[in-house]
Image: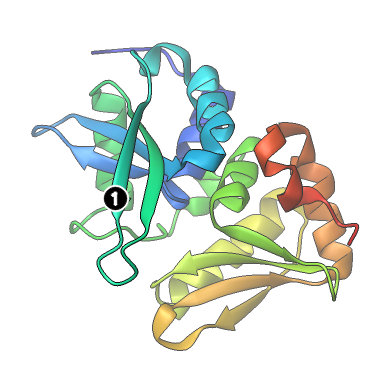
Amino acid sequence: MSIKITPKQEGVVIGSILGDGYVQKTGSKNARLRYEHSSKQKLYLVWKVSVLGTLFNGKPVFVERVHPKTNKTYKYVRHQSNSTPYLGKLRKIFYPEGRKIIPSNLQDLLKHPISLAVWFFDDGYLCKKHQGSYLYLGKVSSEEATVAQIAIHHNFDIDSKVYSKGVKGYALYFNSANTKKLVGLIKEFASSDMIYKVSLTP
């Protein structure tokens, strides 16, 4: 399936891949984008799908899982895109050997503010006590973390520090001044269930 992608749509896709989205291989050239969020973040998922238009069809599916240790039931909402060569190409960039990475050409991919917004909505959080914020990068290398740091600085003029989380990988830390810049850039994209991620007031 071949579709035309706008810069805004590509921004959502890139931010999603960097965040919680998963690009699933569906053939030698094609792949699909899968979303799964807590049911409390349904509006956020619906917003992303609405931006992506014809890349997605159908409706999201609700699933329940029982935690094996606590025996608590958790509800999730899931949706997956159509399979396309476009997503197949992105999978080769972000999953060159089957494991997701932060690619060395991130500066060329992370261009639209909506990319940074989706990435932060997925994996970022505010530290209201210090008015700073963190963007968790996952179990990446220090070199990959530095690539992310440089791309965000170059493309959005927002500075950060690479923060080691030990066995959990790396995060970027934004001080108070740069958190204000970050929030000012991405808050227009926040769905109602993401407002808490861009609200600096205690």
Instruction: Tell me the element at label 1.
Output: strand
Residue 106 in the image, given as x and y percentages of width and height? 49, 52
Q: Which of 89 and 14 is in front in this view?
A: 14
Is residue 190 visible to the viewer in this orientation of the structure?
no
The foreground one among 170 and 78 is 78
The residue positioned farthest toward the front in the image shown? 71
Crowding at mark 1 (Cα within 10 Å: few <14, some 14-19, many 20+): few
What residue appears at the point 31 percent right and 27 percent down from the top-left corner?
86
Left or right of residue 85: residue 164: right
Q: Indicate the position of residue 108 as horizontal and vertical percent values.
A: 52, 45
The quarter of the rendered structure image containing the N terminus is top left
Query: Could you tell me which residue is drawn at 85 percent across and 75 percent down?
Result: 130
Q: Label 1 sits on what residue type?
A: Arg
Q: Nearer the viewer, residue 186 or 75?
A: 75
> On the picture, is 133 further left or further right than 167?
right
Residue at 82% across, 68% down: 128
Q: Which of 142 and 154 is in front in this view?
A: 142
Residue identified by numbered label 1: 65
Image quadrant in which the C terminus is located: bottom right
Residue 23, visible in the rendered structure: yes
> Which image quadrant is residue 5 in?
top left
Q: Which residue is drawn at 77% across and 49% down?
A: 198
In the rendering, at what x and y percent does residue 9 appear? 52, 24
- Extreme-bottom residue of the structure: 166
